[in-house]
Image (cartoon, grey):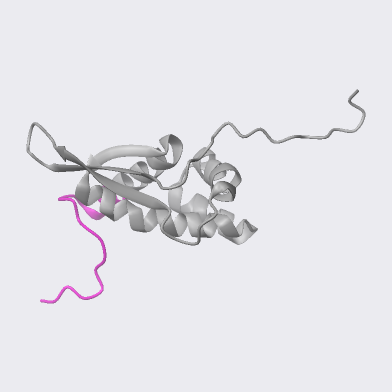
Amino acid sequence: MHRHGYKGRKFGRKTDQATALVRGLMCSLIKYQSITTTLARAKEIRRDVEKLITLAKKNDLASRRLVIARLDDMETADLLIDVIAPQIKRNSGYLKIEHAGFRKGDHAEMGTISFVDDIELNVEKTDDKKGDK
């Protein structure tokens, strides 16, 4: 048997469970800008989140729909497209992984994944409404 054409880690789970795990981790990373998880999980979601950020930076309808489909969470997708992506000025390498020691229970290697750039979530859009005085 060969392993050609299989990408990604299995995490000891069935396919749908591993997909749900990765989506949940991606949503958490986007919401909180930094999460601590096992090193293997951090390395796995880095690839997917960086592709999502590149899509979100295009900011057109097709890209928005792809981001929503891959995250399965409308609020997180809107946060990524409308708030986070415009603040990122680099073309690639949006995330960094730092080693965070070992987990006490099973001695799994832990890592903290976060954005390289500082992201401000409380960016208020100025709406100039006509008739407001």
> At x 27% / y 37%, what residue is drawn?
36
Residues drawn in magenta: 1-19
Left or right of 12 in this view: 116: right
Left or right of 84 in this view: 41: left
- Which residue sits furthest top? 133
On the image, the x and y values in percent for residue 111 come to: 23, 43
Foreground residue among 113 and 6? 113
> At x 27% / y 53%, what residue is drawn?
43
Q: Quadrant of residue 28?
A: top left
In magenta stretch: residue 128: no
Left or right of 13 in this view: 127: right
On the image, the x and y values in percent for residue 131 come to: 92, 28
Q: Which quadrant is home to the N terminus?
A: bottom left
Characterize the magenta stretch by its predominant secondary structure.
loop
> At x 34% / y 43%, what residue is drawn?
25
Q: Quadrant of residue 8?
A: bottom left
In magenta stretch: residue 3: yes
Q: Quadrant of residue 133?
A: top right
Foreground residue among 10 and 117? 117
On the image, the x and y values in percent for residue 73 come to: 48, 42
Count of numbered labels shown in the rendering: 0
> At x 46% / y 55%, what residue is drawn?
52
